[in-house]
Amino acid sequence: MTVADLGAAVLAAAGSMFFVAGTLGLVRFPDVYSRLHALTKADNVGLGLIVLATILRAQEAGIGLRLAAAWLLVLFASALASHLIAREALRRGIRPMRRP
């Protein structure tokens, strides 16, 4: 096992943990806004770590560039989708939950 293999395994495992944390946030958090926050932040970081792991294992630089470009597109799409969902929830009168 090379250093690149070990680094890729560590990055992929860390990325998977972020995906699990985002999923738990979706299930456990009380309102739509905190759920959106958990999903977008955790999933974007998790995907970034997995993309980095895959780039470490890529055979060609072009593959790494395409993976990085795909990750950037996912970042923009995730931010846009989250904004639209939050704006629609606010428009429908769903207020963020306040602590008692």
Image (cartoon, grey):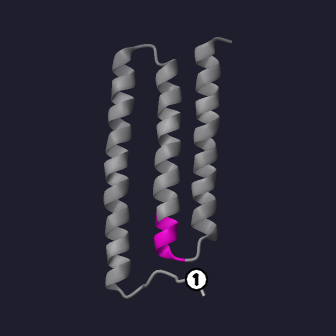
Image quadrant holding the N terminus, namely: top right
* Residue 76, placed above or below residue 68: below
Q: What SS does tag 1 mark?
A: loop
* Residue 22, placed above or below residue 8: below
Task: Identify which residue is drawn at 35% across, 56% down.
Answer: 79
Task: Identify which residue is drawn at 47% across, 18% down.
Answer: 58
* Residue 37, placed above or below residue 88: above
Dominant SS of magenta comes to helix
Q: Which residue lies furthest to the top in this view?
A: 2
Left or right of 46 on screen, residue 67: left
Query: Residue 82 location in percent, x, y?
Result: 38, 63
Number of on-image labels:
1
Instruction: Say if the magenta span includes residue 80.
Output: no
Query: Residue 39 location in percent, x, y?
Result: 50, 58
Left or right of 53 on screen, residue 67: left
Image quadrant holding the C terminus, namely: bottom right
Q: In which quarter of the image is residue 70?
A: top left
Q: Which amino acid does label 1 sit on?
A: Arg
Query: Residue 3 location in percent, x, y?
Result: 62, 14
Magenta extent: 31-36
Category of crowding for the residue at label 1, using alpha-carbon neighbours closer than 10 angstroms: few (below 14), some (14–19), many (at least 20): few
Query: Circle 1 sits on which residue?
Result: 99
Q: Residue furthest front?
A: 100
Task: Identify which residue is drawn at 33% across, 52% down.
Answer: 77
* Residue 98, placed above or below residue 82: below
Task: Identify which residue is drawn at 37% across, 70% down.
Answer: 85
